Every structure is written in structure tokens, then in C-alpha cells.
Image (cartoon, helix red, strand yellow):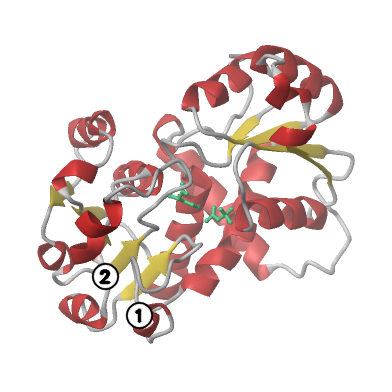
Amino acid sequence: MTSSLKHFLDLDVIDRATLREIIELGNGSRESDPSNRSNLPLVGKTLAMMFEKPSTRTRVSFEVGMRQLGGEVVVLSQSETQFGHGETIADTARVLSRFVDVIMLRTDDPQKLADLAKYATVPVINGLTDLSHPCQLMADVMTFEQHRGPIAGRTVAYCGDGNNVVNSFIHAATQFEFSLRLACPDSLRPDPSILRWAIEAGADVTVTDDPLEAVDQADCVVTDTWVSMHNKEEDRVQVLTPYRVTEKVMQHAKEDALFMHCLPAHRGDEVVDEVIDGRWSVVWDEAENRLHAQKGILQWCLS
Ligand code: CP
Ligand code: NVA
């Protein structure tokens, strides 16, 4: 990897001050008028987005965000490119680097992302892998702080599958210094090496199999789909049913607790309508903040 490149790969490999700088760039985006076309910072720059999995929010927010910053966008899907038909990641990285200024990849294997970053001569952004989803967590931190002020010292509880979003939550709890209470079935706990990293870094992250214990007096309750894009349905639904976020679950959190979900939601599975549409929910702000957070990420990568 060319050390001077500003890749946005995962929250554990970017220092805290830089993450905060990106959040502030994102907050600046939320406060700015996108119709003001003067002094656009990314005029002449092009973002390539490579999708090996479906997306609504990531695709639209990156594309709109890049355009609002004055830049251009190229979207590549697996079925339409040589990348999906045997061309190596190293060669794809070398070629794309001759055409564009920054590359975003959504893929399955985190090694593909690492290889892209190794061989690209432009910054690379992680748009989700089976292991992590750091862009989402930047938006989630922004959303909490938009509604409740600094997240440091506050408590976030997560109920459900210990998946890629949770792994990035563990990174975020460590870097942004909030407490994280995870309630996951024993068979679906988050990545042990990421948990170990967090504990060694002094983070306050705990895992239980009891959702009510996790949400007790929490400032924010979070969940995600029970069946991620890389999962087979199998018997996950049965083992995850006790982790559904219901009104009863929310009533164990603080009176003014927030509810967040990265979306897409599977209503009636991981969350009931009364919660996602209820007084706790900030999921639409959270979705909007993908746009602002990623405008921060793009500006940082290209600064
Ligand atoms: N939250 C999120 O990444 O949504 P998409 O899969 O629609 O991009
Ligand atoms: N955990 C989900 C997140 C979707 C944005 C998945 O990987 O499918």
C-alpha cells in the first residue's frame, strides 16, 4: 500500500482525530446548501463504485454526494465488468487508478478490499464487506450526536446477529469512546478477533445473550437484518426471534432512547412497526446521514 494514500478501509485503522475530522466534514455537509454550486471541492474528480452486492443507500448516497461536491461518478456492477469475469483485483486496481481519483468497493471478502487498496494508486473506500461496514457507522455516530450530543460516554445496545455492522460498531465504540452492550445468540456472536482488539484497546464492550440486560438504561438501541446478504436463511430466524426489538424492549432503555437501524429493515423480524415508526426512531435521519458522512469521507480521501 502506498502509505500516503488516504484509504477509508475500517475504523480501527484510522486514528481518532481523523475520524472526528471526517465527522465534522460530514456535519458541515448537512448544514450546507447543496444547490450552492460555488467553491465545489471535488470538481474534476471522479469516483468509481464497484458493487458485487446489491445496494440502495450506499449507491445513491455516494453518487449524489460526489455530484454535490462537484465530482463525477462511474458505477460498475459485477455482471457488467471484467472484474466479475476473472480479471484480477490487482489488475483492476491498476487500470481504474488510471481513470478515476477514488474507488469504492462493496464486496464479500475483505481480502478483495485489502488487495484493491494494495494495488490502487488512488484512495479506496470500504462500501461494506462480509466483515464490516464503516461508512454506516460514521453515519450512525453523526445521527446519535445530531439528536443527543456527544456520543462519548453514552451507552448503545445492539440486539440481534453479530454481523458486519456489529463489527464496525465495536470499532466505533472503541474509537468514539462509547459503551456498547451486544445481545447476540451464542451461535451468532461478532468476530472474536475484533472483540479482542476492542478489549485490548480498553473499550467498554460486552456481549450477552439477554436482550433486556443489554438494553437496560441504554441511550440508543440498534438492530440489523437477521439475514445479511451473505447469509443463507437456514434456522437463523428461530434463534434470533428472542432478539426482536419490540416496544417492550425499548421500554427497558432510557425514556428518551433512540432507535437506529442501518436499513433495509425486515419489519416484523428484527424490529416491529411500532418501534421503527415510533417515537424512538431516527432511521430516516440515519439514512440521510449516509450522504453527509460520505461527503466527509470523500473530501478527506481526496484532500
Ligand atoms: N445501509 C446500507 O448500506 O444500505 P444499502 O445496502 O441499501 O446500501
Ligand atoms: N448486515 C447487512 C447490512 C446491509 C446494509 C448485510 O450485510 O446485508
Q: Earlier in the sequence, mark 2 or mark 1?
A: 2
Amino acid beneath label 2: Asp
User: Is the residue marked 2 within 8 Å of ligand 1, measured from its CB?
Assistant: no
Q: Position of residue 177 (x, y in %)?
A: 29, 49
Q: Nearer the viewer, residue 83 or 22?
A: 83
Q: CA distance from mark 2 to mark 1?
A: 15 Å
Q: Nearer the viewer, mark 2 or mark 1?
A: 1
Question: Is residue 121 something that shows in the picture?
Answer: no
Q: Which residue is mark 2?
A: 219
Tell me if mark 2 has few (under 14), some (14-19) or many (20+) residues whose alpha carbon lies within 10 angstroms of its own: many
Residue 35: numbered disc = none
Q: Hey, which quadrant is residue 170 in on the image?
A: top left
Residue drawn at the location 82% of the way across and 38% of the way down: 46
Q: Position of residue 50 (x, y in %)?
A: 69, 36
Residue drawn at the location 71% of the way across and 67% of the way down: 32
Residue placed furthest toward the front = 234
Left or right: 17 in relation to 161: right
Figure check: 138 above or below 273: above
Q: Which residue is mark 1?
A: 275
Amino acid beneath label 1: Val
